[in-house]
Image (cartoon, rainbow, N blue to C red):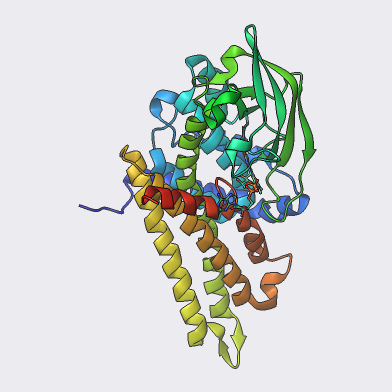
Amino acid sequence: MIDFSLTEEQELFRNAVKTFAEQEVAPIAREYDEREEYPVHILRKLGELGYLGASLPVEAGGGGGGMIAAAIMSEEMGYASAGIYLGVYVHVFLALNAIARFGSDAQRASYLEPGIRGEKIGAWGFAEPDAGSDPGSMTTRAIRDGDDYIINGTKLYITNGSIADFVVATAITEPTLGMKGLSLFIIDTDRPGFSVARKLRKLGVRASDTAELAFQDCRVPKDAILGDENVGFANAMRTLTAGRIVSAAFALGTARAAFDQSVAHVKRRQAFGQPVGQFQGIQWQCADMALEIEAARLLMQKAAWLADEGLPHIKEASMAKLYATEMCARVTGQAVLLHGGSGYMMDSDIQRFYRDVKVMEIGEGTSHIQRNTIARQIGL
Ligand SMILES: Cc1cc2nc3c(=O)[nH]c(=O)nc-3n(C[C@H](O)[C@H](O)[C@H](O)COP(=O)(O)OP(=O)(O)OC[C@H]3O[C@@H](n4cnc5c(N)ncnc54)[C@H](O)[C@@H]3O)c2cc1C
């Protein structure tokens, strides 16, 4: 029996998030993109409303909505603003999700609970200047010193980097073991030795905060380790696999926004004495966009369902992320063309969608890395 309908509770959640996104996020999306500033108040309000924890397990203090709730929130928020949602996404689905999965009771009380309420903001520190796709090249090191670890290294392109209260970051604890010698740490950003080296400017998602982070003899207590020592790589990958399904939903939301505005535009815009949407070439292009959005939705829903059922889903998560993010880049590019010159102007949402979505093919494992994962999963 296959059922794609949402439950009444899921529908209520979708309507609530959609209303919030329409009323509070979409109207400020352009302004914060231009200011290249993150509207922290949005994350705080989502916490007050109880939406940040909606998908997280009940035993971790969340609402227990699972991947379907995560997908609903990501699609509706991605529809309103990819830039503003990126910070929420990293906070919830990478930083908090890792703590929900692997955190001790004390870590849940100190970071997860205030994180769910939107009182503390988390970042995810995986990438480094010489290690993005290739975690085996990481150099950030954590050396045990009595009851502490001393951390040295640099993390690059870190979303929420300059506004976070804590960073969930990888560091090498056993250099002889390669990637199997990595551990995850929760590091408070007010610790001596932690600094924001620089804030980074970007092509798109400019309403998100991105920074380079430096750890210089940053001393953290031994219980800052998240999960067991030397299993950080496996735990980071588990977190990122779940995140890939959510990224697919996020991309789906932005693609749908570009599509809806395109259909409205081609119905309205006249050329050669008729709406351009009357030309078959334009209709076929819109039909292809609708088809691709629907295909991405089905891939995402299947991966989300497998994850919620506790079934293997590494291949499906990569497929959903790969297809949805590349689809989103294609659809937003076509939306610019369908809008003609008006879609290229800075006062148009369409150019922002086009700039914002390129990062989706890069973050959480590039499209190449997703193809590598799928190839491995099919036995190559
Ligand atoms: C706006 C933004 C926000 C980000 N936020 C975060 C964050 O919050 N936390 C975090 O940890 N990281 C974050 N990242 C980093 C992101 O995850 C990395 O940029 C990404 O993983 C790619 O790494 P890289 O930039 O080092 O590229 P590289 O790894 O240097 O890749 C360069 C090219 O080589 C290709 N390539 C590499 N290896 C292979 C291979 N084996 N097979 C085929 N092709 C390959 C890549 O696909 C790419 O095309 C962010 C990045 C951006 C742009």
| Res 252 visible | no
73 above or below 177?
below
As drawn, which residue projects farthest toward the right? 198
Q: Where's residue 211, x and y in %?
A: 73, 39
Tag count in the figure?
0
As drawn, which residue projects farthest toward the top? 146
Q: Where's residue 376, x and y in %?
A: 42, 48
| Res 95 visible | yes
Q: Where's residue 229, x and y in %?
A: 52, 19
As drawn, which residue projects farthest toward the front? 176
Q: Where's residue 348, x and y in %?
A: 68, 66
Give the residue drawn at x 43%, y 53%: 320
Give the residue drawn at x 44%, y 69%: 290
80 above or below 275?
above
- Residue 303 is left or right of residue 32, and the answer is left
Q: Nearer the viewer, residue 227 or 42?
A: 227
- Residue 378 is left or right of residue 73, and the answer is left
Give the residue drawn at x 65%, y 54%: 27
Q: Nearer the viewer, residue 167 or 347?
A: 167
- Residue 200 is left or right of residue 283, and the answer is right
Q: Nearer the viewer, residue 106 or 366?
A: 366
- Residue 205 is left or right of residue 60, and the answer is right
196 above or below 80?
above
Give the residue drawn at x 39%, y 38%: 66
Picture quadrant where residue 129 is located? top right
